[in-house]
Amino acid sequence: MTAKQTSESLPILSSLAFPDMLFASIIRSRAARAQNNLLNQPNLPAGYRIIAPSGILAQGLSLVTASGLSVFADKEISYQGEPLGLVVGPDPLLCDELAQTTDSSFEALEPDLGWESFSSSQIAYRKTLVQGDPEKAFEKAANVEKAVYHNGVFDHHYSEPMGALAAWEYDKMAIYCASQWPAHVRDSVAAVLKVPAADIVVKVTELGMALDGRLWLPSLVACQAAIAARLCRRPVKILFSRKEDYLYTSKQARSAVTIKSATDANGQFLALDIKIILNIGAYNPMAEELVNQAMSAITGLYVCPSIRLEAYAVRTNILPLGALGSIGSSHAFFAIEAHINHLASLIQKTPAEIKAVNIISKGHSNFGAEPLESEIPFLRISRKLEQLSDYRRKYASYELVKKRDPGCREGIVRGIALTLGYQTDQSFFESPSMNTYIVEVTLDRNLALSIDTHGAVGSEALRAMWKTTAAGVLSMSENDVHILPPVCNSAIQCGPMTLSRGATIINSLVERASRALQKKRFRETLPITSRAQIRLPHRLAWDSRSLRGQPFSGASWCGTAIEIEIDPLTGEPSPLSVWMVIDAGRIIVYDRAIASLRASILNALNLCIGDEFDPEGSSDDRYLYQRQIKPSSYPAINIEFLESEKASRPRGLGELPFVTLPAAFYSALTQAIGVEPRQLPLRGSEILRLLEAE
Amino acid sequence: MTIDFVLNGKPQKTQIRSGDRLVYVLQKLGDFPSLIPDCLGGNCGRCLVFMDGRLIYSCLTPAFKAKGSSIVTYEGFSATEDCKDIIYGLKQASAFPCNFCRKAKIMMIADLLKRIPLPEETDIMEQMSIVSCPCTDPVSLAKAVLLSAECRNKRKFKRADK
Amino acid sequence: MRISEIFYPNSLGDLLELLKANPELLIVAGGTEVVGMQASKSLSFPAQIASISHLPELQKTTRSEQYLEVGCCTTLSGLLTLSSGALPAPLPQVIQSIGNPAIRNTATIGGNLCCKRRFMDLWPFLACIDAQMEIRSLHGNRWAGVSHLSDDAGLPQFPEASILTRIRIPLHAPNFSFFKKLGNSRFPSPESAYFVCMAEISHDKIESFRLIFAGERAFRLKDHEATLIGRRVPLSQKDIQPIVDYYSAEFVEKTGNDNYQFNALTEESLGRISGQ
């Protein structure tokens, strides 16, 4: 690697090619649940071969990664589309055709598809927490409400389909792939090849928008490519087609959240009984974390004396489902915000008023967490947001319209909603070594600074932030600062790039390393290198497993308001305006932060109006006509940052739209149509049906 | 079968199969990093080329349709002054498309400015639907188009003066 | 990959000879439909394909005082670049709602009309304004209304061993038109459809009336349209409701779809006619 090869020109996997490179296509299971699977080897053209589990084991390799994931289904098949083997050869198009026509024989079993009611064998993880005496509180309460909220399965729409390239580079195997967690890739590949981790070099390719969908799945594909490269002794590339990516990569988990609440006349919570069920599909190595994050988020912002909280990650025979940004918390935010909306309509208050009486304040906590050390800035945020969006006036007038015209026959079908949310950079991985982050900065002889993060590089906005930080500390031009392509090639454990750690942890490490380098400048001869390192557990403030500590340490706060309009003729909802007020600490590159948030808002809105993925029978071609907001119909977007102390450190903000917008969109939709559909997304014809019923 | 066409100004003669998409045929003919066939459905724009002067999705075009045509990829377009104007506009507007769609968005802007030298916001928004990648803030991108147009028109106007 | 034989006919005559020899011949002009719906890297085609977009006689545009005549290989972008006023009022808007500029650079009017799996955007409009099409086969050529591209069951149909060569678009469109595109996906999805209602209102009387809903199936009640002719406008809500109810019941029976959107659109269009 040279200083000139920077992350501004990170390779794109699709464009990467090596001499003598072979291509591999995945042979996939046709059954959702089966056993005694056996691939029927067809007659292959010369130069093509099939790699099956039996052959892999015969070569002394392993089928299981370091984290216990199976690279190929061997005896048992747990979902339709599960990888069974590979077809490897020189022509990728022919490999695809051969993989699709390769048959397997198996004994089909009845798949487990039920998840809202499930058997104990389907539970991947469960957890129950109780505080106070919920049963007693419910007995006494006058207002008790119960509702179930559903969240659909959504595709990540990655910038590039999933894939990996494995090639021998001298005595090491290089893996090129777009992963948020290069160390996980390295350890997984080392485990299946049964070699030391030091023999594997992971070179991260352009990641694009990953939304936590590239935490562990790229490792599996990397293992498949590595096995093929090892057995064929040639570079091997696997690149899913967009259709394959749509049909077979992990999606956001399906959720059902049942909330039973007891409230007083002001809407203050007296008791909550919450059951969260997450359908994680066939498996998900992060099931525990999904559950813990959802549990943290669902009561995180609000206080209640008596809570019973029960959460399950349930296995079913569909493709693995998991996170889509914010690792589980968006489900929780959606449900609790929708429930508050429901309560508001019952007691004739605005949702904002109900939130105000329940919001957690200084000195309070749930489940024995440490009392909140300082007030969270929601009062400031919601005041500003109400002022910007003219929330109160609009809310009142849309309520009036709804009362006057319940079926919305006058044609004005609008709604406005305001949602609060947060994102944290809290650590959640078990192993302390998985929470180590390192940044190395080097000032070379040409007075150019290179930043080496040892981890994945995220968005353009993030790179700009690191450059600005380093350039600011060292008083140099940003043009002279380069970010090296991330290469995971040593024994150093690097944590995953998730939960906005690029903006928070890595940025502060860039700052620290640059300061250390500044001290050496003009004293030592060039090149000068300095390094900053952090192990997160040492400063962990919140443990989502035990729900102990300070849950909001390092959090960014946000309020989102959205105004939507329903076409009374087609029922299609369209967002008119979005307002966000954010407190995310110090904003380093203001324009980039705004631009990046705008793009995230549009992505999150596409999820709200888009089509749900149907893992049990999704049409093959559905991905071709995903519903999207047309650029000509983009809403007006207004983003404001609350002024933070100059010294406060920057905090993450990229996930805030994904955390808050679905709940806000749902609430605005509910106000517009006057009915609570209790699920997202909804088609136009369904909305018209609800309107007609109203 | 064999077809002839002109690629970035150079005559080409190549073997194709009836089921080949144009983008894959072009990829085999040289180093074209701008061509990243992805959606295969005329959506992502990562295969955009000019065919006989019109912007098309080469993934959505059967290779046999290229017979006798003239094709320009981003690599052929990038040396032009028009391309430099667009890059200037993007930079000035702080619009930074990701590495996956940057070239596609440049081709998209180039096509718009060729057809409508002074585009209005509605034209820009309509054109943006050619490349679906949502990485770039639409406000900055629209600003970039207007700045590119200004730069391009200034340059062409000055030349006409001379 | 199945290897197909590709033909590049030199003239329309050649093409008709080819059609005679190979009735299953796939005629490709823009190719957006036949390629767009295939997700695999390699494309599958029937055994014989004819590429026709290079034939100049299929790209000609002529204009008379009554109509515009366009060749079937005219691209949708090409139609939009015709001088303003060359197309009847709602048509430019309809064309602009199709795909995006790059798709329209490739897609042709002929391809849009001849789609076999569903009705695309242009058909309901052209059927409403009684556009004509020239169908050629070795047996000769004939002109017919584009409405004949729908069979009695409302499914797309096209005569065998024939080719649609020209489309004649009347320049005078009815003075009332209301349309709505359903579905907001980039490509026609199973839920996508077009609702079009056109009427000629003269001296407070309905002189002509057309209402077409077209997606995977076409829905039109020609007989009922005739019963509305001669009615005086504005129509009262008492007049409108029975019409909506009749259309609604027929819609459910003939298409099997739910009628929430259809009812709202029918009521809206009749209300607008009354508002004139």
Image (cartoon, coloured by chain):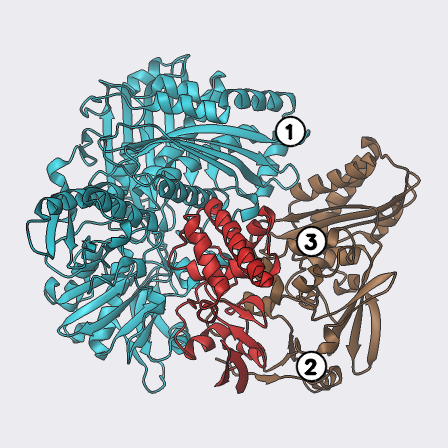
Which amino acid type is shown beneath numbered disc 2? Pro
Regarding mark 2 in the picture, which secondary structure is present there?
A: loop
- For disc 3, the neighbor class at 10 Å (few under 14, some 14 to 19, many from 20) is some
- Label 3, secondary structure: give it: helix
* Residue B83 left/right relative to C249: left
- Contact between marks 2 and 1 (CB within 8 A): the answer is no
Chain under disc 1: A
Residue at 31% over, 64% down: A11
Chain drawn brown, letter?
C
Image height of A262 relative to B68, above or below: above
Q: Helix, strand, or loop for circle 1?
A: loop
User: Chain B rendered in what hue?
Assistant: red
Label 1 belongs to which residue? Answer: A407
Q: The residue marked by circle 3 belongs to what chain? A: C
**How many numbered marks does the figure carry?**
3
Disc 1 crowd, CA 10 A, few/some/many (<14, 14-19, 20+): some
| Chain painted in cyan in the figure | A
Q: Please check whether the numbered discs 2 and 1 fall on a single chain.
A: no
Q: Is residue A368 above or below residue A175?
A: above
Taking the image as drawn, is residue A145 in sight? no
Nearer to me, C136 or C202: C202
Residue corresponding to mark 3: C94
> Cα distance, mark 2 to mark 1?
54 Å
Which amino acid, by three-letter code, is at mark 3? Val
Instruction: Give the side of residue A344 with respect to residue A28, left or right.
Output: right
Q: Which mark is residue C23?
A: 2
The picture quadrant where one finds residue A683 is top right
Q: Where is residue A75 in the image (x, y as percent from the top left)?
A: 26, 66
In the image shown, does A101 or A344 lie closer to the viewer? A344
Judged left or right of residue A622, residue A467 is left
